[in-house]
Amino acid sequence: MKRKNILQNTWVVAALALVCCALWGSAFPCIKIGYEMFSIGSDAAGSQILFAGYRFALAGVLTILFGSLLQRKVLFPNRNAMGKVLKLSLTQTVFQYLFFYIGLAHTSGVKGAIIVGTNSLAAILIASLIFHQEKLTVPKTVGCLVGLAGVVAANLSGSGMDFDLHWNGEGFVLLSVISYACSSAMMKAYAQDEDPVMLSGYQFLTGGVVMIAAGFFMGGKVVGFTVASTGMLLYLAFLSAVAYTLWGILLKYNPVSKVAIYGFMNPVIGVLLSAVLLGEGEQAFHIKNILALILVSAGIVIVNVFPLRRDRKKVRTEKTDTE
């Protein structure tokens, strides 16, 4: 019970969620570096999917290995958990990334980034309106819209954004977002009865194997394995394993909205880390990125502070009634 209370503490949730966001944010520049190391072109969708398959399969192996060592038993899904693992692997890994890579090839980077930035809003809407895991309140809605405004601010350039839409471009990226949102709600539901570490490990492994097969089918290839490039692939696998496992544990003990709202930090952190790792320092502290950070932070505060005040008021009322 003590562990559950700790994992529901607002500051603990914030710290662990930001660790996840920092790891996911580092994926943006590291994937670009990985593509260069393995000579994967921006239009080589098959090779990109194969590379992602290797990454997620490795993430699954690492998660299962570390989870088994920590729990001193081999993590393995029972018959009831197998169906949950399959559904999670399809939504969290296979559908999300297949739709993402194909869609991104038929849309601009700006539009793709902004649509992907709606991940957190979509997760909260689906958890509230479809899975009925929590109520969609005004503070949650306002906080999400403010956070989304931050994502838009971080990605809009001086020339703005056109509104020419393609079903296999922006449409596929949106399907990727919906797939991710469904996986968050499903993880929340499944983690109540199953070990979230086990679910994370096996969904990654299963999804990774499917993506490897899809990558080979699409004619993809990943060559140029060196100590440096292999190390980068292992790091990408490690960050996925740690971030998604922590995220799943937080979802187990908290409302989706309390956790998902931090997802708006991913692109902001991605921009800042890209500035450092890719030598784009002059862009890091551009006014639009500072504005984005302010808006995203404001959205997180709105979603977390208003319910906290309401709960404290409720506790005081109940205490008064008791006395």
Image (tube, rainbow, N blue to C red):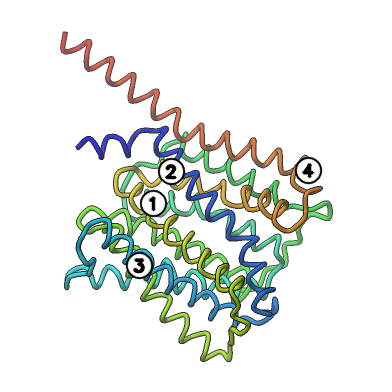
Label number found at residue 246: 1
186 is higher (above) or lower (below) than 311 = below
Front label number (4 vs 2): 2
Which residue is nearer to you in this view: 274 or 116?
274
Which is more N-terminal, label 4 or label 1? 1
Task: Give me the residue at 45% from left, 28% from top.
Answer: 305
Q: Which quadrant of the figure contains the N terminus?
A: top left
Front label number (2 vs 3): 2
Front label number (3 vs 4): 4
Spot occupied by residue 261 in the image (x, y as percentages of width and height): 48, 44
Spot occupied by residue 87 in the image (x, y as percentages of width and height): 33, 70
Q: CA gap, disc 2 to disc 3?
A: 22 Å
Quarter of image, res 233? bottom right
Q: Which residue is mark 2?
A: 16
Which is more N-terminal, label 4 or label 3? 3
Q: CA gap, disc 3 to disc 4?
A: 38 Å
Which amino acid does the dot numbered 2 rest on?
Leu
Q: Which residue is mark 3?
A: 88
Most extreme residue toward the front is 227
Which is more N-terminal, label 1 or label 3? 3
